[in-house]
Image (cartoon, rainbow, N blue to C red):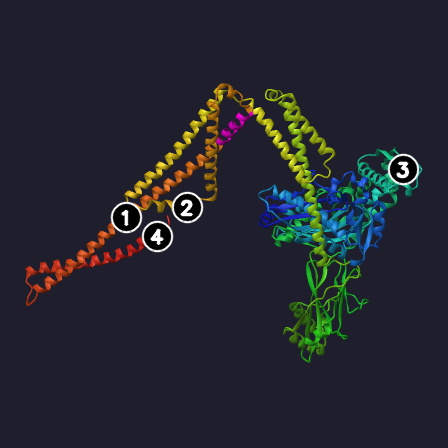
């Protein structure tokens, strides 16, 4: 895979993409955003995967407390009735599904109920504070997904280069997932506040995409030869074998084609855990001479937890030992399980290990020898006897461990999310071809016995197709959708007869119903469009001719034309003539009437409708607010606890210094304050609210500052000589500041004088400059400076009063009081120096603008004077020209011949005329310049 292509696409996306591999046992998530290329979303403990589960318990303050994943810890065995685990196997299932009874046998204390309002879906009934709380499977899944989203948002906040939102999501699902299961995933993602679901990605597809992306190809391998691979995935709840092919094209593109899937929906890691659990439970019952009905849910939960650990340990060791202390009647139970026992109890399951592989190969007529390698995925592929059986079946040399069994699905899901987000296909990118694992059919108007294939098994997904339903004799229409023969949903068009009447067709045309169906990228099968079309009555003949082997009518015009041309040569003359007529008639586009699609009716599980979704989103939003309040409470408690221990250490480490300033009883008072508050926090603060804890924090901060002041006091000379030096230094600083302020004023005064001497309005220009420079921050700084300076003057004056006292009276002034004034001066000096630096910078900038404005105004004055003189000169030249012309006219009266001597006078007159003309031109230019000058005079400085 060309990762340059991936990184280019990453930088093109606006928001972040999150890919989620929600497993039955563990969940992994990958974040993809600019600055974050395929990064695992860590848990709060820094783990790369999290337990798929949630604990919902009563809380004395907020009513409900939710704890996610691995944070549940011992709650799983202490409160099994409040912990929801292995939720994945219930997604999209009905209450009467056999999986429900099986689930409750190993999830001790869980109470599942039927939700009749949604066609028999499943709800969890939890007892919280003696009240019943019901949560649907979709709600519980949404809670976990929203927790992942919040963790991803936290990661984004820590990366300044990344996008700030997580709205685009892709999630992996089982390849055998039904339509109701897929809809349940979509409902959960929307409840989890993801606004854009990119797609539901089958687990085998995600692993194959990750495998193909990591695979390196030599130039010689781009030879258009298809090679077959298989993903063997043993998860917690089921086993799948996904057969796929990779074809390196000579064009440089990699084609990844999903060929087939073999599954065992009830064999997985959970099956193996159950088998060990039966061994441990039997040993426990024999040890204490008990019946299973006499054992509490808490004990059963502990035994099941031990079975899970034993399965993991026995994958690498020959024996597992553990001791459960005080598990029953305050007695311990020592448990020991060997790998041989584990394999013996599962001996009847060995044949099921390779069955999914056989199914996947048989469905497309391949043999084991046709597979180049088998990619192992899923935690349970680490179990030795599973690896051994797979290796014996396919050959040990074909076992590939090139993918990370824990993270490949999450990475591939995110990569697929990016492809769906950008909707681009580079020549160097992997071209993915996905196929349907189910048969999708329809029936019309209740005729369930005649199911029409729409998307047979193996159809390319992400496509639409049209089906001509023909004429409807009863003028009623119900379209039912099926998946492998099982009814998914039905659309009943109540007003269809009226729709038929509205369709304007000619007498030689039939009113036929054409329905458009879609199998989208998430393999959701649905009806998306219905039209009533006016078709020539004899076109039914052509449709018969053009039916393909799978009985689907060809709808593409070009294809139909080509087929008709072929058929003309293979039919008799009558049929040929008829076919030509039909071909000519259908070349004219038929009229159609759009029919709005009604809401579907579901036979069993109903999706969450808009009203219910809104209510559930508000419910989850409320629970999130409770969680936020709990988080804040915990953070504030931790902050208070941390500050208390810090203060206690601070007192102890500085005790010798404090003894110089305080009595032992005063130092002990601080220690007692800390100890009492720690005890209150540990034993009496369970009902404390955030505000109360924050007030305690302020108390601690006050005490800490007092101690810091005493330590600082020990370093200061508070003798009269020391205070005198403080007074002198303070007075000197104040005089320096006042001198700077006077200098500022002197600069302004000098500038004013210069302006006045040049007959310029200083106040007007100064106001403009002040408005240009002034902003709210500078105004605040000036006010702060004035306030600090005034306080500084008052403090200096007060210290001066102390120094004027006789020695005896001065000695009676407490060090604490003197320190308070010393502290004011110390803080005042720092504040004023910073403020003064800013004021000096501002004053410098102001004076520079005043000087620049002065220079511009003086230049304008000069320009005005020059133009004034030019105008006066032009005026005088005009007057002189007029006078000369009058004199010339008088001199020429009665003269018939011009003498040579007079020629010079005429030439001089011509010069004068030219001069006059130039003067007029200059006069015009001057007039234009005056207009420019007027505009300049009104410009803002």
Residue receiving disc 4 = 938
Disc 2 to disc 1, how far (Cα)? Answer: 24 Å
Labels in figure, total: 4
> What is the secondary structure assignment of the residue under circle 3?
helix
Asked if one can make out residue 214 in the rendered structure from this viewpoint, the answer is no
Disc 4 to disc 3, how far (Cα)? Answer: 100 Å
- Crowd tier of the residue under label 4, counting other residues whose Cα lies within 10 Å: few below 14, some 14–19, many 20 or above: few
Find residue 772 and name its label: 2
> What is the secondary structure assignment of the residue under circle 2?
helix
Residue receiving disc 1 = 861
- Crowd tier of the residue under label 3, counting other residues whose Cα lies within 10 Å: few below 14, some 14–19, many 20 or above: many
Residue receiving disc 3 = 284
Asked if one can make out residue 116 in the rendered structure from this viewpoint, the answer is yes
Q: Earlier in the sequence, mark 3 or mark 1?
A: 3
Above/below status of 875 relative to 540: above
Nearer to the camera, 440 or 917: 917
């Amino acid at each position: 895979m060309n990762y340059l292509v991936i990184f280019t696409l990453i930088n093109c996306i606006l928001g972040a993409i999150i890919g989620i591999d929600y497993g039955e046992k563990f969940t992994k998530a990958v974040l993809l955003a600019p600055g974050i290329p395929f990064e695992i979303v860590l848990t709060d403990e820094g783990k790369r995967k999290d337990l798929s589960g949630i604990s919902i318990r009563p809380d004395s303050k907020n009513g409900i407390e939710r704890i996610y994943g691995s944070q549940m810890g011992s709650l799983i065995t202490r409160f099994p009735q409040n912990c929801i685990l292995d939720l994945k196997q219930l997604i999209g299932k009905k209450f009467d599904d056999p999986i429900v009874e099986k689930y409750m046998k190993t999830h001790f204390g869980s109470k599942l109920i039927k939700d009749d309002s949604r066609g028999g879906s499943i709800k969890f009934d939890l007892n919280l504070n003696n009240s019943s709380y019901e949560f649907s499977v979709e709600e519980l899944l949404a809670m976990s997904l929203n927790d992942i989203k919040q963790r991803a948002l936290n990661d984004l906040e820590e990366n300044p280069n990344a996008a700030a939102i997580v709205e685009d999501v892709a999630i992996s699902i089982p390849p055998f997932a039904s339509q109701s299961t897929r809809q349940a995933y979509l409902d959960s993602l929307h409840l989890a506040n993801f606004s854009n679901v990119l797609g539901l990605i089958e687990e085998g597809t995600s692993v194959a995409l990750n495998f193909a992306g990591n695979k390196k190809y030599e130039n010689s391998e781009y030879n258009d030869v298809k090679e077959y691979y298989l993903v063997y995935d043993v998860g917690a709840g089921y086993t799948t074998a996904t057969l796929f092919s990779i074809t390196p094209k000579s064009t440089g593109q990699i084609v990844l084609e999903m060929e087939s899937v073999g599954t065992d929906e009830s064999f997985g890691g959970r099956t193996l855990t159950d088998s060990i659990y039966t061994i441990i439970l039997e040993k426990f019952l024999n040890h204490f001479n008990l019946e299973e009905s006499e054992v509490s849910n808490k004990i059963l939960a502990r035994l099941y937890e031990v079975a899970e650990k034993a399965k993991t340990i026995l994958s690498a060791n020959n024996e597992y030992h553990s001791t459960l202390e005080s598990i029953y009647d305050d007695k311990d139970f020592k448990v020991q399980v060997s790998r041989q026992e584990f394999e013996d109890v599962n001996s009847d399951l060995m044949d099921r290990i390779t069955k999914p592989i056989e199914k996947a190969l048989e469905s497309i007529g391949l043999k084991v020898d046709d597979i180049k390698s088998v990619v192992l995925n899923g935690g349970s592929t680490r179990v030795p006897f599973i690896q051994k059986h797979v290796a014996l079946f396919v050959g040990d040399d074909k076992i590939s461990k090139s993918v990370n069994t824990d993270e490949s699905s999450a990475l591939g899901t995110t990569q697929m999310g990016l492809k769906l987000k950008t909707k681009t296909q580079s020549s160097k990118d992997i071209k993915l071809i996905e196929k349907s694992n189910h048969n999708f059919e329809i029936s019309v108007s209740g005729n369930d016995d005649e199911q029409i294939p729409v998307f047979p098994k193996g159809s390319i997904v992400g496509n639409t197709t049209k089906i001509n339903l023909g004429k409807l004799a009863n003028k009623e229409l119900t379209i039912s959708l099926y998946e492998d023969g099982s009814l998914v949903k039905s659309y009943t068009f109540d007003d269809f007869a009226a729709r038929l009447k509205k369709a304007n067709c000619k007498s030689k045309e039939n009113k036929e119903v054409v329905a458009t169906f879609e199998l989208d990228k998430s393999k959701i099968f649905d009806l998306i469009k219905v039209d009533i079309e006016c078709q020539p009555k004899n076109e039914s003949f052509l449709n018969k001719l053009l039916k393909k082997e799978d009985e689907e009518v060809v709808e593409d015009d070009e294809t139909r034309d080509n087929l008709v041309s072929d058929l003309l040569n293979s039919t008799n003359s009558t049929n040929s003539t008829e076919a030509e007529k039909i071909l000519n008639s259908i070349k004219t586009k038929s009229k159609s009437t759009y029919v709005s699609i009604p809401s579907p009716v579901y036979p069993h599980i109903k999706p969450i409708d808009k009203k219910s979704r809104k209510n559930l989103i508000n419910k989850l939003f409320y629970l999130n607010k409770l969680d936020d309040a709990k988080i804040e409470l915990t953070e504030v408690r931790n902050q208070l606890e941390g500050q208390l221990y810090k203060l206690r250490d601070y007192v102890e480490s500085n005790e010798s210094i404090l003894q110089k300033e305080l009595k032992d009883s005063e130092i002990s008072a601080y220690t007692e304050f800390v100890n009492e508050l720690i005890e209150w926090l540990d034993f009496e603060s369970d009902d404390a609210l955030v505000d109360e804890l924050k007030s305690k924090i302020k108390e601690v901060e006050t005490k800490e500052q007092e101690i810091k002041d005493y330590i600082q006091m020990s370093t200061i000379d508070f003798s009269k000589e020391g205070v005198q030096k403080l007074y002198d230094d303070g007075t000197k600083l104040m005089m320096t500041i006042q001198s700077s302020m006077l200098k500022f004023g002197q600069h302004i005064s000098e500038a004013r004088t210069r302006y006045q001497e040049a007959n310029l309005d200083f106040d007007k220009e100064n106001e403009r400059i002040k408005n240009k420079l002034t902003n709210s921050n500078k105004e605040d700084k000036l006010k702060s400076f004035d306030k600090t300076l005034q306080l500084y003057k008052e403090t200096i004056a007060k210290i001066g009063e102390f120094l004027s006292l006789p020695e005896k009276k001065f000695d009676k002034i407490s060090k604490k009081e003197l320190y308070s004034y010393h502290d004011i001066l110390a803080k005042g000096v720092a504040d004023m120096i910073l403020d003064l630096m800013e004021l000096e910078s501002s004053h410098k900038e102001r004076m520079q603008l005043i000087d620049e404005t002065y220079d511009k105004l003086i230049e304008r004055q000069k320009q005005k004077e020059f133009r004034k003189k030019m105008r006066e000169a032009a005026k005088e030249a005009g007057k002189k020209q007029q006078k000369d012309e009058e004199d010339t006219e008088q001199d020429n009266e009665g003269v018939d011949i011009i003498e040579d001597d007079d020629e010079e006078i005429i030439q001089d007159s011509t010069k004068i005329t030219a001069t006059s003309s130039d003067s007029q031109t200059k006069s015009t230019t001057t007039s234009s310049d005056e207009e420019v000058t007027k505009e300049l005079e009104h410009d803002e400085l």
